[in-house]
Amino acid sequence: MGDALPAYTAIVLAGGQGSRMQGQDKGLVQAGKKRLIDHALARLQAQTLAPQTILISANRNVSTYAKLGLPVLTDSMQDYPGPLAGFLTGMQHCQTSWLLSVPCDSPNFPQDLAERLLAQAMRDSTDIVIAADRSSQGEQRKQAVFCLMRARLAQDLSAFMLAGERKIGAWVAGHPHSVVCFDQSGDNPMAFFNVNSADELSQLASP
């Protein structure tokens, strides 16, 4: 299946304020033997459909991230406007038709994430595909920061944000989109577990 799917660029979102972790730069927080950014990059490099290019979105410690040998992009909008700013910056620097975003604080995201999202995009001829999982009660939970989007939506997203909008869900809802739920046999129910506190960092099982 992967051979028939288009190339994509991936961006790791590490540009937040880390407000729930005492202002720490989450990408540089140690999780086991590696930092969270290292886990995210390793997960991208291990995808069943590898990205053509990997970008890093960061607004602090840029020189530290640059040592990873990948392009480091800062938000074009000021004052930490959230994940959508990382989406926008990624699309503005994307050399492929598709951009995949992943956060730096979910080190166990699926290794077939890109392949399944792109396959759904091709089936539905849609512009945006987001990941989802299920709660312990069986309710679907959208994990919208894990987002596959057409790079040509950059101008649209810029206008959306300039109008003061900041919510991923509101932007996605305005476009043809699909959802892929990672609740199949063999899927890790904790794949999208993200770290927002020291307690959650300790809950990671061998990330």
Image (cartoon, rainbow, N blue to C red):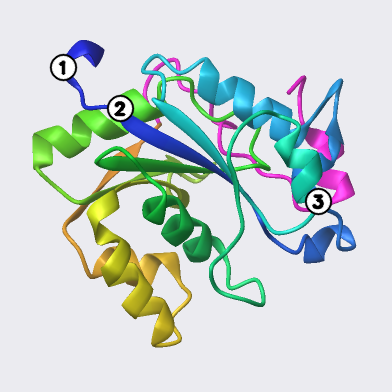
Where is residue 182? Give x, y as percent: 40, 32
Q: Is residue 5 left or right of residue 84?
A: left
Dot 3 surroundings within 10 Å: few (below 14), some, or many (20 or more)? few
Q: Name the residue under label 3.
A: 61
Residue at 19% x, 51% y is 127
Q: How many discs mark residues in the rendered view?
A: 3
Q: Name the residue under label 2.
A: 116
Q: Magenta region: which residues? A: 183-207
- Residue placed most toward the observer, 141 or 166: 166
Residue at 38% x, 53% y is 91
Tell me the number on the disc at residue 4.
1
Q: Is mark 2 on a helix, strand or loop?
A: helix
Where is residue 130? Give x, y as percent: 35, 47
The Cα–Cα distance between marks 2 and 3, rounded to whole angstroms, is 33 Å
The Cα–Cα distance between marks 1 and 2, rounded to whole angstroms, is 12 Å
85 relative to 26, above or below: below
Kind of residue at badge 3: Asn
The verdict on residue 184 being magenta is: yes
Image quadrant containing the N terminus = top left
